[in-house]
Image: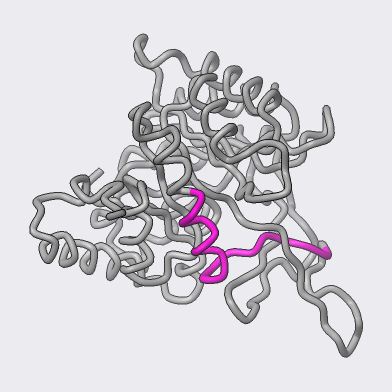
């Protein structure tokens, strides 16, 4: 990529809709909306709500479905002036297998990201919080897109922010995803939360609950990146994309110092569509101020 800044899935339209408000050639990559086998209308409104320290969303995986994406959107992917990462989602293993395989066959789609935070309707828990289920879905997607040594495209696993109170740690999940065939880890998806209108005593979001993103989650994700990098990814040589609450250049820089090779921007896009471009320029200035030639030299550079 020409830049470590990535536009996160679901925040930049289905593919390249943000090209009208920013120069995508300055961005490292854009991640498509998460695509499922069939079209989805998504949840009832309200779907997005601001909260004091960020944003709640309950979009409900609204998307055109893989057939419409391949027909109407994929032909434009090769002309997008940055890398394009296709996001695959679903509700069972075969969903991910199907979508990942179709996305990987599209010219201009450079890599596949698995959104493994959707409910596993076949077995109960979310794929992303269970090592066995995660292994199964990543392995199936890896087989569908082909092995890297045979020309298969890079596979990213987007993990949930597993922190405390669970028997499975974020490091366990990261290791399971990589062992099953993931090349890159995206840390992390949104944190479950809700908002209540105290006058009506009803949930603000139509779905009741949603995913919290924005500044509130940044310190949480920062710690998770540090844990995965120091306890697994550094030695294994696995790149990390840091995602969660990157509103300013120093938020992005902190992710890099903790162990991220790239940073995703999501909520900031809703506040200011020009923010990613500024982040690119400000990160470049930070790299120069640190006396190094590339941001890569600062990955995992936390001083003890």
Q: Is 215 included in the stretch rendered in magenta?
A: yes
Residue situated furthest top in the rendering: 150
Which color scheme does this rendered protein use?
one colour
Instruction: Find residue 177 and report its horizontal and vertical position in percent.
Output: 54, 27
* Residue 86 vertical placement versus 154 (above, below): below
Q: Residue at horizontal 29%, vertical 66%?
A: 279
* Position above or below: 36 against 7: above
The residue most toward the bottom is: 199
Above or below 133: residue 272: below
| Residue beneath the point at 45% across and 48% down | 225
User: Residue 36 or 152: which is nearer the viewer?
Assistant: 152
Say if residue 9 shows up in the picture: yes
In this rendering, position of residue 36 left or right of residue 302:
right
Inspect this view and state whether residue 109 appears: no
Residue segment shown in magenta: 208-224
Report the residue at 58% width, 73% height from top.
Answer: 54
Q: What's the residue at 47%, 40% (across, down)?
A: 228
For residue 188, above or below residue 179: below
Q: Does 243 sit left or right of 61 as displayed?
A: left
| Residue 116 image position (x, y, % from top left) | 63, 38
- Left or right of residue 139, residue 3 in this image: left
Quadrant where the C terminus is found in the figure: bottom left
Location of residue 218 in the rendering, given as x and y in whole percent from the top left corner = 50, 64
Q: Image quadrant of residue 89?
A: top right
In the picture, the quarter occupied by the N terminus is top left
Q: Is residue 299 left or right of residue 12?
A: left
Residue 210, by quadrant, is: bottom right
Q: Count all numbered tags in the image, as a single digit.
A: 0
Please name whichever residue, 127 or 152, is drawn nearer the observer in this view of the structure: 127
Coordinates of residue 137 in the picture (x, y in percent): 64, 24
Query: Which residue lies most toward the right here?
Result: 201
């Amino acid at each position: 990529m020409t830049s470590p800044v990535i536009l996160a899935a679901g925040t930049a339209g289905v593919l390249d809709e943000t090209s009208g408000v920013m120069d995508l050639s300055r961005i490292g990559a854009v991640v498509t909306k998460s695509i499922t086998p069939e079209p989805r209308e998504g949840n009832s409104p309200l779907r997005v709500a601001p909260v004091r320290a960020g944003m709640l969303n309950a979009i409900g995986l609204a998307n055109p479905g893989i057939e419409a994406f391949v027909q109407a959107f994929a032909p434009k992917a090769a002309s997008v002036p940055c890398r394009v990462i296709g996001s695959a989602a679903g509700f069972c293993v075969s969903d991910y297998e199907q979508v990942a395989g179709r996305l990987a066959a599209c010219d201009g789609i450079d890599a596949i990201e698995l959104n493994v935070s959707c409910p596993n309707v076949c077995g109960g828990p979310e794929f992303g919080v269970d090592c066995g289920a995660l292994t199964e879905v990543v392995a199936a997607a890896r087989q569908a897109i082909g092995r890297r040594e045979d020309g298969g495209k890079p596979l990213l696993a987007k993990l949930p922010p597993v922190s405390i109170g669970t028997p499975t740690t974020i490091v366990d999940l990261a290791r399971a995803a990589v062992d099953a065939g993931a090349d890159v880890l995206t840390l992390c998806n949104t944190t479950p939360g809700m908002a209540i209108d105290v006058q009506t005593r009803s949930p603000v979001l139509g779905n009741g609950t949603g995913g919290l993103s924005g500044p509130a989650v940044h310190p949480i994700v920062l710690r998770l990146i540090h844990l995965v990098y120091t306890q697994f990814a550094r030695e294994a040589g696995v790149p990390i994309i840091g995602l969660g609450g990157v509103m300013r250049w120093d938020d992005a820089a902190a992710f890099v110092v903790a162990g991220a090779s790239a940073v995703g921007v999501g909520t900031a896009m809703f506040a200011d569509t020009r923010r990613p471009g500024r982040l690119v320029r400000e990160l470049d200035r930070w790299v120069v101020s640190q006396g190094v030639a590339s941001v890569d030299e600062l990955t995992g550079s936390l001083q003890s």
